[in-house]
Image (spheres, rainbow, N blue to C red):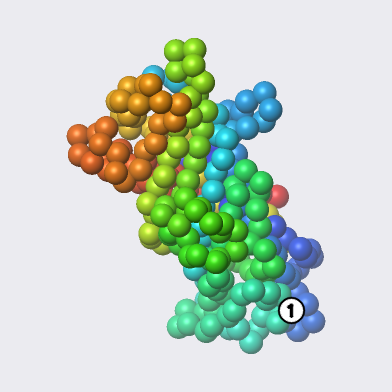
């Protein structure tokens, strides 16, 4: 997949050097999520465009993230890892090596570059990174009463100009699936690692114009699994959700 502007999940190093602590390996790093793009507004908000060239400025971006798993290189066992590197995370030995897990789910404000609160993991050369986007669990950190994340795993609102009138489009994506990224060379310890979502791909090839025309008299256009502006109900939401899933890339950010 190509790398472009991004919604980013960042692993920020809290240690340095050769990632060794005593006879064990792995300094603690935190895990954070943010949203970014090559296109930005005057106040630095991320932007994206549709097929017609209409420009959208992201106003809110939130996701419910759970079941984070990081696969350590083959041959590394949990006993080899510095115990103090774990906070809010656990380690289990698998056939191919240790697997570090964060089971708690969190509702995250992507524009605020939110970290998983209180969570650290060891900074190893992970060979696989998996996490789950799903509907939020009531009472989970960051979830509020009436939260749209209780019904949808990924919610974005963006402002746009509709023939001189200010409108908002809200994408309510019904995620309930794992996203796995396997870097070819592994991750480099001590770096900042980013799972990038290319915001420019989210509505690429998606005919959202009809959705906007159907709601032209409303201040807000909502695209969710019940939307009927495609050929089939929910078709547009499904296409955007697939684009979001397929747009991810993993890199370190030295």
**The N terminus lies in quadrant:** top left
* Relative vertical location of residue 56 with respect to residue 30 in this rendering, above or below: above
Label 1 belongs to which residue? 84
Q: Please tell me whether residue 213 is drawn above or below residue 204 in the rendered image.
A: above
**Position of residue 30 in the picture relative to residue 178 (left or right):** right
Residue 172: image quadrant is top left
Question: Is 158 on the left or on the right of 227, as rendered?
Answer: right
Residue positioned 45% across, 26% down in the render: 219
Q: Front-most of 240 and 145?
A: 145
Nearer to me, 93 or 9 = 9
User: Where does the image place residue 39, in percent across and percent down from the top left?
Assistant: 58, 28
Question: Residue at 59% of width from left, 47% of height from top?
Answer: 110
- Where's residue 24, x and y in %? 72, 81
Residue 99 position, x and y percent, is 53, 76
Q: Is residue 84 left or right of residue 136?
A: right
Residue that lies at the very extreme toward the top in this rendered image: 164
Residue 188 seen in the current view: no
């Amino acid at each position: 997949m190509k790398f472009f502007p991004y919604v980013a999940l960042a692993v920020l190093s809290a240690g340095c050097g050769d990632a060794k602590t005593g006879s064990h390996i792995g300094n603690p790093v935190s895990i954070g999520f943010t949203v970014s793009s090559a296109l930005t507004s005057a106040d630095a908000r991320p932007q994206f465009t549709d097929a017609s060239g209409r420009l959208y400025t992201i106003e809110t971006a939130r996701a419910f993230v759970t079941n984070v798993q990081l696969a350590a290189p083959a041959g590394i066992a949990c006993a080899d890892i510095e115990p103090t590197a774990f906070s809010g995370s656990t380690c289990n030995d698998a056939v191919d090596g240790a697997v570090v897990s964060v089971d708690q789910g969190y509702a995250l404000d992507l524009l605020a570059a939110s970290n998983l609160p209180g969570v650290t993991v060891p900074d190893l050369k992970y060979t696989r990174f998996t996490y789950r986007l799903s509907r939020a669990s009531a009472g989970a950190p960051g979830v509020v009463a009436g939260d749209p994340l209780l019904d949808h795993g990924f919610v974005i609102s963006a402002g746009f100009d509709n023939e001189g009138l200010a409108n908002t489009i809200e994408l309510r994506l019904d995620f309930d699936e794992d996203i796995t990224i396997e870097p070819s060379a592994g991750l480099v310890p001590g770096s900042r690692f980013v799972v990038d979502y290319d915001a420019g791909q989210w509505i690429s090839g998606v005919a959202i114009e009809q959705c906007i025309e159907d709601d032209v008299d409303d201040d807000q256009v909502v695209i969710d699994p019940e939307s009927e502006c495609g050929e089939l109900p929910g078709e547009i939401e499904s296409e955007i959700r697939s684009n979001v899933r397929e747009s991810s890339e993993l890199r370190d950010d030295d």
